[in-house]
Amino acid sequence: MTPENTQIAKQKDQKWLTLSGYCILGLYVLWVLWFAQQRWLHSDSAYTLFRILNLEPLFYDRYANELQVWPAQILAWTGAPIKWVVLTLNLSLPLFWLMGFHYWKKRSRSWFLFALLPVCGGPESFFLGYSEILFSAWCLAWIINLAETGQARHRLLFLLAGIVLMVDAHPASVLWLPLLVLLAWHNLNRQLFFASVAGFCLYFLRNLLFPVNSYDSGLIARLTDQAVWQNLLSQYSLFYIKGASKSWLIPGWISITALVWTILKNRIRVVYAFLLYAAAVLFISLVVYSRGDATILMEKFFYPFAVVCLSAWLFNSQNARFRYGLLASVMVLSAAIFFSRSLWYSSKYNNRLVALELLEEHCSGSGLHKVVVPSEKLSADTFLSHWALPYETLLVSSLNSRDTNVTVRGVTRSEWTGTKKAISNEEYLGAEFVKPALVNKLNSTYFRLPVSATTFDSSGRLLLR
């Protein structure tokens, strides 16, 4: 093939890749808008939405994620309709990916990351309308593309700012800092190398000066937990990865594809360094999430490893036609699996939303506003996690534009008597780890709970199954 024909073929592949990226990201934006209510009326998402609407401080340490939620927070401060707030919360991050893809498509060789990384997630892909770790991946994609733009003015400062945002957004992103060091070594990029090393130093300095929250510190502590190391082969994470590898795990097959590409197309020293790094990331993930507490279906356990493996395409720029053609095919296939699995999970959470609406409607129709039910009678299939039920029912009631709202809390039999004595007419019950709050402290723009007695439904008759 002549050089001219090769250039024409390369341009066609690039156009196919560009079209695929725009289609995928366009569908992604429509997807998160369509399923916004199912996503935000579930578990910790409902608690986050409640705090935003109640004008409460949101983040305890991951402040970079304010960039995702500030549009919704502004709407809440102005008293905008609750549906606008919900849609805005689910729209910010997809628009970040779309803007990144559009901005870098003619400025860098790695712009495809903005279309590939959002759809390479695992089973929790349905929840990626807002995601701390996916925002961190967006920062990573921006850093990699910025590093390829030549000696841009103030580039080192922007690289360092991007790394600070990436690490602050989610602690697991520290696993991606060695990737940036490898890229700097491979491309002889001094600025990226210095920014990555500075990122490591800032990360450890921050943890020394400002200790992380108890949840994150508990996960990190497992790296030095002797009990975990002694029983590593019997840990939940290892059994999960064995089972998931036999089914449809997206990061699994796509990571293997990227690793094979690295082995076939790179110098042997790059292969050894990269495989050693990928194995270390997988091993650390197995230890840190050994007990299976990596959110719904372990998605965050696999995602950092998948991103590392996908970056294999960044280490070789030869045979561009095959590279772009393969990437376009992988992106389309990843998106097809992403949306099909998201559709499967959306039906499950749609059923949960219907159950919440029925429960809220039944309580509202009975003239009840603050209700406590036995948690043992909550359907295990529908309400697998019910600690956020007070916020979920309150939000459903607000979305339904009730004159007075409804909130329902599940309490175990052992806590029944103590709860009945402790709660007063001026208070309402939130999550187990939150003290009873005063009704008059709620933001009346969105929540209208009357000062009334709490109904204790010991028989569970209000629960519709």
Image (spheres, rainbow, N blue to C red):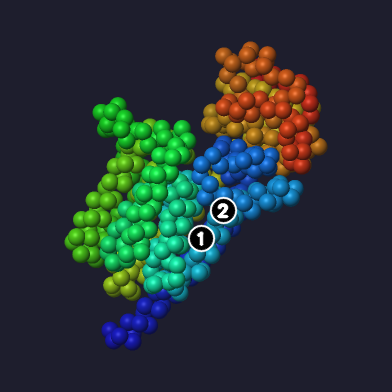
60 left or right of 194 in image: right
Q: Is residue 353 visible?
A: no
Q: Residue at x 19, y 60 (%)?
A: 269
Q: Total marks drawn?
A: 2
Q: Determine whether the residue tagged by mark 1 lies in a helix, strand or loop.
A: helix
Q: Is residue 188 visible?
A: yes
Residue 297 is situated, as x and y percent measured from the top left of the image, at: 44, 40
Q: Residue at x 31, y 45 (%)?
A: 282
Q: Residue at x 40, y 49 (%)?
A: 202
Q: Please state which of residues 92 and 372 is positioned toward the viewer in this rendering.
A: 92
Neighbour class for label 1 at 10 Å: few (<14), some, many (≥20)? many
Q: Please state which of residues 87 and 200 is positioned toward the viewer in this rendering.
A: 200
The residue indicated by pointer 1 is: 97
Residue 90 is situated, as x and y percent measured from the top left of the image, at: 59, 51
Which quadrant does the N terminus fall into? bottom left
55 left or right of 269 in image: right
Farthest residue in the left direction? 268
The residue indicated by pointer 2 is: 67
Residue 195 is situated, as x and y percent measured from the top left of the image, at: 37, 58
Separation of disc 2 and disc 1 at Cα?
Answer: 13 Å
